[in-house]
Image: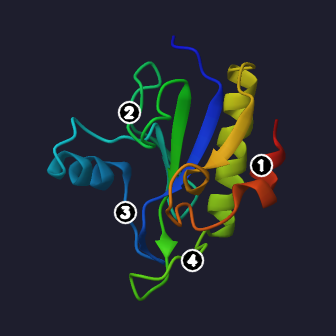
Amino acid sequence: MRPISELIIHCSATPEGKNFTARDIDRWHKQRGWRGIGYHYVVLLDGTIQEGRPLRQIGAHVRGHNRGTIGICYIGGVAKDGRTAKDTRTPAQKRALLEICKRLTRKFPSIQKVTGHNQYAAKACPSFDVRKDPLGSLV
């Protein structure tokens, strides 16, 4: 297994309340010319956690920060207008994100931090400040 030191949280940048899956994201990423989904996990609206790219593989989710990280994406992150960044996490998604991050920090004690994509790029993703969220204080 590759060394892991960080979890990076993302949103799918899809409109609030619209259901999508890891399979949809895989298709979108392939349409962009990638070999497949760039995230390791996807959290659905109902809190279901789906696997994406295998953990043993380096993700494709933050330019310059893929090695040593795990990418976790929740479905949503944009208001119903399809353009405005918004924290659209359902209560089930918030619980699931916290649970998957706790599980991964137990599995990989080398994890030193949980961050948001917006801490590395001029993007709204994940449409909330991970540093001010319970996720940011896990490690």
**Do the residues under discs 3 and 4 have CB atoms within 8 angstroms?**
no
Which residue is at a point 28% across and 46% down the rendered structure image? 26
Q: Quadrant location of residue 68?
A: top right
Tell me if residue 133 can be seen: no
Which of disc 4 and disc 3 is earlier in sequence? 3
Q: Secondary structure at mark 1?
A: helix
Q: Which residue is mark 4?
A: 86
- Residue situated furthest bottom in the rendering: 81
- Spatial separation of the CA atoms under disc 3 and disc 2: 16 Å
Q: Is 136 left, or right, of 75 in this rendering?
A: right
Q: Secondary structure at mark 4?
A: loop
Percent of width and height locating residue 60? 38, 37
Amino acid type shown at disc 2 = Arg
Q: How many marks?
A: 4
Q: Secondary structure at mark 3?
A: loop
Q: Is 135 left, or right, of 40 in this rendering?
A: right
**Do the residues under discs 2 and 1 have CB atoms within 8 angstroms?**
no
Q: Which mark is residue 136?
A: 1
**Do the residues under discs 1 and 4 have CB atoms within 8 angstroms?**
no
Q: Secondary structure at mark 2?
A: loop
Q: Is 12 left, or right, of 94 in this rendering?
A: left
- Spatial separation of the CA atoms under disc 3 and disc 4: 17 Å
- Spatial separation of the CA atoms under disc 1 and disc 3: 25 Å
Q: Quadrant location of residue 24?
A: bottom left
Amino acid type shown at disc 3 = Phe
Q: Is residue 6 above or below residue 48?
A: above
Percent of width and height locating residue 130? 71, 56
Q: Quadrant location of residue 103?
A: top right
Q: Which residue is mark 3?
A: 20
